[in-house]
Amino acid sequence: MPMPDPITATAPELPDHSSISQRIAAFAADLTPEAVPQEVRDNARLHVLDVCGTALAATRFDFAQHALAGISNIAESGSNSVIGMRVKLPLRDAVLLNGILAHGLDYDDTHPGAIVHPTASAFPCALGLAEHRDASGADLLTAYILGVEIATRLGVAAKGAMHTQGFHTTGIAGHFGCAVAAGKLFNLGPQRLQYAQGFAGSTASAVSEHRADGAWNKRLHPAWAGVGGITAAALASGGFVGTKRIYEGADGIFRSHTGTRFNEVEMDAMTRNLGSEWLLNEVAIKPFPICHLLHACADSALAIRRKHKVKPEDIVKVRALLHPETFHYIAEPPEMRRRPVSDYMAKFSVQFVLAACFVRGRFGFAELETEALNDPAILALAQKVHHEADPDSAFPKYFSGGVVVTTRDGREFVHMEKINRGAGERALSAQDITEKFYDNATLVISKPQAERIHAAVLDMDRRSARDLARALAL
């Protein structure tokens, strides 16, 4: 692993009475590409590679074409690139579509403690604005890293309270990360970077009602965060005045979006060790195209099937062990989850995912096709899957999970995953991430095309942002 650069970023010393947004703004304004440790930059490029692969794969799914059709109904001519599509759109429309592609398969990265998908908003935002302004690839990478850092810190500070209040934290946190990322690319000074964060508080909303019917709203959330962040930074660049205590104020974002759990918010996480501790290094890359909360259970089911040669027809009961705070997101109401009406609902069903793992011995895109959603064997086994609390869960630091299987002859098999694969000490390697990228990209493009994108991403901070954007657009 490369040694960190001798120059490192440090958060400026400000008076104790300074607001959170003021501290973040001062840090962001001073940050240079050289001040970001080499390890962080190396990891950042791998996360960009990962999201580019997932966005490319997304172009073969119907939601991508419906999104393009809708955006095209209002878009005028533009010059910004769209990942995997030979179309040009105005800046914010391109960011919107790229964000939908990045998050649409729910295969993008997640910070477990924050419960935030940071790259799906930060990268489309930074890519779009950097291309528009003909910024350097180094400045694009720095802005992206800032976007990840701020969005993730907001999620860590919220401690899951936004989720339980009915919001999708990614859509809230992404607005703030993108406001800072875009502000950096606009070369804003500290005051106007503070204003940009203030405006993000007025645009950030992402309700989670999609959980009830498998609708596509969630795909929009990080995309809209990118649009909101650019709008906020643009207004600030013109001198429009934004509020200065958007995080900790009496009517700030934490008060409005955490409800009765406001007292649990860890406000100092927003700026603690800012510049010396980079949360991007904690962001997990997914091995399955499903909700990250389900990964440990899926791996547990596959481990039991592989180790004990368990056949679906021999199973009488499956118990999925999860943290209770995740039940409403991936397990309840069980009747609805056992027979998902769409591939998107299936991604958030522990009953369906575990049944498919036992029946198919894997879980990938094929297990989300209509044929799999209607597979009698999977649906029959899903009826036998029940969920209960895991008393030893490490949630939210990690998305722990496990499975207990009871067979017809009375045997019981147990497998637990304390740390979900992809996170912490079980992080995917650079080789794993590269293989995932090629698996996703080659669903829609040739291997030589994928190789050119791979090279462009890993070399992104030594070329122009426009070069990278145009390479991604094929």
Image (spheres, grey):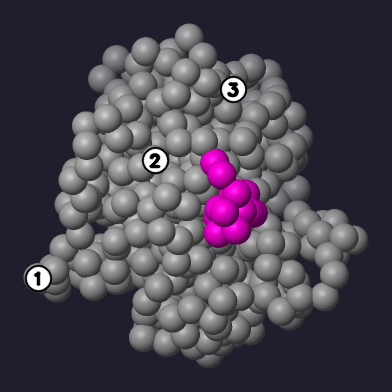
Residue type at the position of mark 1: Pro
Residue 469 image-quadrant placement? bottom right
| Residue 109, x across and y down, in percent | 44, 52
Q: Which residue is denoted by mark 2 in the rendering?
A: 21
Compare residues 193 and 428 and report the one nearer the observer. 193
Q: Quadrant of the C terminus?
A: bottom right
Q: Which residue is denoted by mark 3 in the rendering?
A: 166
Residue at 61% across, 36% down: 202
**Marks 2 and 3: which is nearer the front?**
2
Residue at 73% across, 62% down: 93
Compare residues 263 and 239 and report the one nearer the observer. 239
Label 1: which secondary element: loop
The correct choice, above or below, for 15 with respect to 406 in the image is below
Segment tinted magenta in the rendering: 226-242
Residue type at the position of mark 3: Gly
Q: In which quarter of the image is the N terminus?
A: bottom left
Tell me whether circle 2 and circle 1 mark residues in contact (CB < 8 Å): no
Label 2: which secondary element: helix
Q: Which of marks 2 and 3 is nearer the N terminus?
A: 2
